[in-house]
Image (cartoon, rainbow, N blue to C red):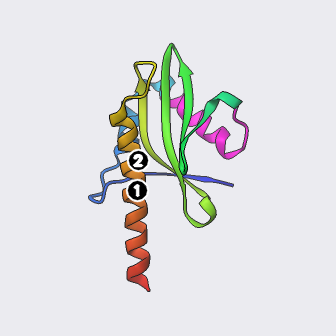
Amino acid sequence: MDHWRFYKTEQGGDVVRDALDELRVAHKAAIIDVATRYTRSELLADELETIETGLFALRVNVDGCALRLYFGKVGRGGAICLAVHVLNKKSQKVPKKDLDTARRRLREWNSRVYRLKRGAD
């Protein structure tokens, strides 16, 4: 079973959790629900989007808002879902800066883990 973790900056900033906490209660609950259903393989076909190799988005539509939770599969065998960005989508197309943020955070996390593993060898 997959487990969820949240991206943190190198300084320990919990930016994804902070972004979730800024959402309305119903929006946050809907994201948590779809994330839970993802780990149970209970998603509807339109709730998961592959952005690119290794980067995915959970799609949530609630109260007329299009929310996205971007994540990557990390850890041994990809058993950890690392939430890297939350977006309340305001337009048809996802802004490039939001995709860049998700990509950068996932890349930075993987780089940090690689450095830690190399230091342990």
Residue 29 in the figure: left or right of residue 2:
left
Categorize mark 2 by other alpha carbons within 10 Å: few (<14), some (14-19), many (20+): many
Q: For the view shown, which residue lies furthest in the bottom direction?
A: 121
Q: Is residue 35 magenta?
A: yes
Answer above or below: position of 5 versus 114: above
- Could you tell me residue 58's position as x and y percent? 56, 35
**CB atoms at circles 2 and 1 under 8 Å apart?**
yes
Q: What is the quadrant of the N terminus in the image?
A: bottom right
Image point 38% across, 51% down: which residue? 105
Q: Amino acid at mark 1?
A: Arg
Q: Residue at x 73, y 37 (%)?
A: 42
Tell me if residue 57 is in the magenta stretch.
no
Look at the numbered disc 2 and give the secondary structure of its residue: helix
Give the image quarter of residue 49: top right
- On screen, 116 above or below 20? below
**Which residue carries the number 2 mark?**
103
Quadrant for the C terminus, please: bottom left
What residue would you read off at disc 1?
107
| Residue 97, x across and y down, in percent | 33, 35
